[in-house]
Amino acid sequence: MNDESSQHRSPYAGRWVARVHGKVVAQGGTPDQALRASQHSRHKEKPEIVFMPASFILPPLVEKILDVLPADQEIYLVGGAVRDLLISRISPDLDFAVPSNGISLARKVANALNADFVPLDDERDTGRIVVINEDGSRIFLDFAVYRGASLEEDLRARDFTINAMAYNLRDETIIDPLEGGNDLRQKLIRACSTTSLSDDPVRILRAIRQAAAFEFKIEKNTRDLMKQAAGQLGRVSPERLRDEVFKILKGPKPDASMRALEMLGVLQQIMPELASMKGVEQSEPHMYEVWTHTLAVLDYLDQIISSLRVGYDAEKTNDMFTGLLTLRLGRYREQIAAHFAKPLNVDRSLRSLLFFAALYHDVSKPETKTVEESGRIRFFDHDVRGADVAAERARSFNLSNDEIDRLRVIIKNHMRIHSFADRVQNDNQTPSRKAIYRFFRDSGEGGVDLVLLGLADVRATRVHALTIEMWNAYLDVARILLESYWERPQEIIAPPRLMDGNELMKELGLKPGPAVGQILEAIRENQAAGKIENREQALAFARAEFAKGLNGES
């Protein structure tokens, strides 16, 4: 193989090739495939069948695993990990296929790595190792016996050809019976068989997610199989559906992915309340009907979070609105990154939860739609009712209580940003300290999510009709809120308590009841507004409030 230059070798890395007079004339995932392919074009010549070594470096964890196992232990890296290695991506999880003893091998490796072990599936003899990194992130290592009589049978039973490859960790060869490597080069997602999607319908969502993640196309016949299998999604567990939905929302192009799911008839099966938004008209200033607007919000939210990430080069943007965004809010890149780094559930990102909220923020517009005599369309209380609808879907997906609470907060309060911006633009009135305190009192850490969603919402509402003046009004509000939250928390967001309920009751001779909490909250509001600075002022204010109550004043 020395007569092949590195640049000629790279397209065939990890493949078997047929060579005639030193020239590659065909290639395949197995020696037989390469031979058969060469016979079509060079049937009179006898080719040399050779393997082109894969030009990738295995993760250090793999080397540690091999050190633990006996030298004669047959073991293959399979599935997405092989795909990712071939396209120079880092795979967060590693799957291994072995002829037998999957659970016992996993337990042995877990003990050697001092990692957690879970017997994942006794029937399939599958064990999982959970490696926790220093930053708290986790790597899953799954050991499973072949699903079938052989490794090839196992690979053929998988979802898509790009995920149906195996890497022999002993002789460093790639086994690719379905030409997944070729599909990988052609950027094509193709089902392994005509029953791949009906065997496990959740693969429909996985195809959409991977198409977006890799910027691949889904082969036409596979799209047809996806449509045919969509009606069977009801037999998939809510947890598996949830996991795929949240992975889609965490990844690139969530708007395009959701549009694809709607077109394939998938949304009607897993989140039917979303499908009702399609075609629901809106009055100006909205440029789109409700469903298209929702997809646009996902797109703009993706752009906004991306442009505020650490390391983003603001000088490369040619969009004036993005340029202003980074100029006004770029100072908070690290704080935004830290915000999203604190998930409410270890298995799901906070970013994906925010996108789930964006997906549902207008879900109740169809049921709250009214048309005034003037022809103007209104959606009264769509925010409050939408929070309930989203929470119901979240419960059906078995999200945690913390996630459901955050979801409700975001959707219920998503109109407040627009009210703030309207007052800035129309009355030149920025949010008061008391208004800022109340905003974060009601939203907590979700206030950061509300700021980002509000910016995406106005862009998706006005689209090309959005003026620089209006955008600046929204950026003014965003800057004031984030500045208060991150730079002046003790003053405005969470002023220190100057007295507790027991002290207040003792000073005023009060009995326990709602009045105590109401007066304490009023004290904190006035602290945030800068009108109360010490205990004496707080006590004087409390006495005045109590006197008002006795005199029947509101």
Image: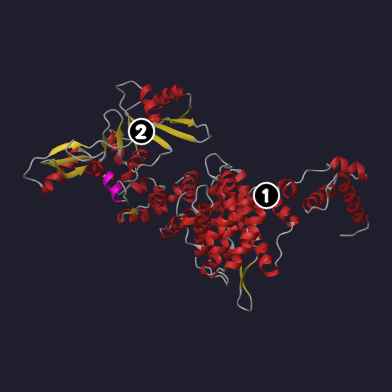
- At x 29%, y 51%, the residue is 186
- Of residue 292 and residue 226, the one placed in the foreground of this image is 292
Position in image of residue 463 (x %, y %): 52, 67
- At x 86%, y 44%, the residue is 535
In the figure, is residue 99 to the left or right of 270? Answer: left
Q: Residue furthest front?
A: 315
In the figure, is residue 368 to the left or right of 3? Answer: right
Q: Amino acid at mark 1?
A: Tyr
Residue 315 makes an appearance in the image: yes
Q: Say which quarter of the image contains residue 467.
A: bottom right
Q: Amino acid at mark 2?
A: Leu
- Of residue 282 and residue 34, the one placed in the foreground of this image is 34
- Magenta segment boundaries in residue numbering: 181-186
Between the residue at mark 1 and the residue at mark 2, the CA separation in whole angstroms equals 44 Å
Residue occupied by mark 1:
485
- Of residue 320 and residue 378, the one placed in the foreground of this image is 320
Q: Which secondary structure, mark 2?
A: loop
Residue occupied by mark 2:
58
Position in image of residue 306 (x %, y %): 50, 52
